[in-house]
Image (cartoon, rainbow, N blue to C red):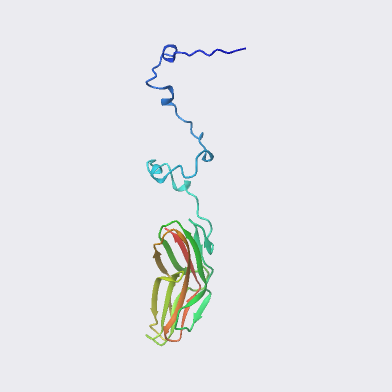
Amino acid sequence: MNWIIKKIALPIVLGISLAAPVWASYVIPDGSVSTAKLANGSVTTSKLGTITGAITQADLATRPSPTPTAAAGGIAQSSSSGSFTTVSATFVAVTNLSVTLTTTGRPVNLLITSDGTTSDSAFGSTGAAGVGQARIQILRGSTEVYLGKQTSQSTGFLGSPTAIVALDPVAAGTYTYSVQIAVTAGTSASLLNSILIAYEI
């Protein structure tokens, strides 16, 4: 059997004008477009910016737990330095204070801070008053991104609580950060119970 399909004049039968198509007012129901139906990269940042209040803090993915090696969006955190002491006048690497971070091109925030244990964290030197002097640096690979100095104001060891912050504006890539210390005057330099943290801001 052959079927014959006849054209129907919609404006006459339905009483509508083709100048305003039926689909022009059609609204896609909420939830009908799933993430699987969107091509990767199809929703751009500029498009999101026009949706006021559409994205809240609760919609953002949480950061993964800190690890010594972190992917983009993660936090790279080292193990503790323990009680690290050196008598070297040239910079030496602090035990455990090295992390690797993959970045997307935003500046990297670097912190040397307490390891969170009940032991005191400190950076300082041992020597006579006004003589003991310790230096500390943070490296990206072999490039210095932070350099600091602490001078003893009393005889014996004098250290200040570890609270060093540095900002490293770098292009997208994967970088390894490390910490080194040296004693430039006095007997020794120490970094106690501290960790290195790196993340994009």
Res. 11 image quadrant: top left
Eyeballing the image, is 101 above or below 38? Answer: below
Q: Which residue lies furthest to the front in this view?
A: 2
In this orientation, does residue 157 appear? no
Residue 109 visible within the image = yes
Q: Which residue is drawn at 43% across and 73% down?
A: 137
The image position of residue 121, as x and y in percent, is: 48, 73
Q: What is the residue that sits farthest to the right in this orientation?
A: 1
Rendered location of residue 173, percent (x, y) = 46, 60
Provide residue 91's location: percent of width, then percent of height. Answer: 45, 79
32 over 42 or under it: above or below:
above
- The quadrant where residue 184 appears: bottom left
Place residue 43 in its image quadrant.
top left
Q: Which residue is drawn at 42% across and 11% down?
A: 12
Q: In which quarter of the image is the N terminus?
A: top right
In the foreground, 164 or 26: 26
Provide residue 64's location: percent of width, then percent of height. Answer: 53, 56
Q: How many marks?
A: 0
Q: Residue at x 41, y 43 (%)?
A: 48
Q: Nearer the viewer, residue 160 or 48?
A: 48
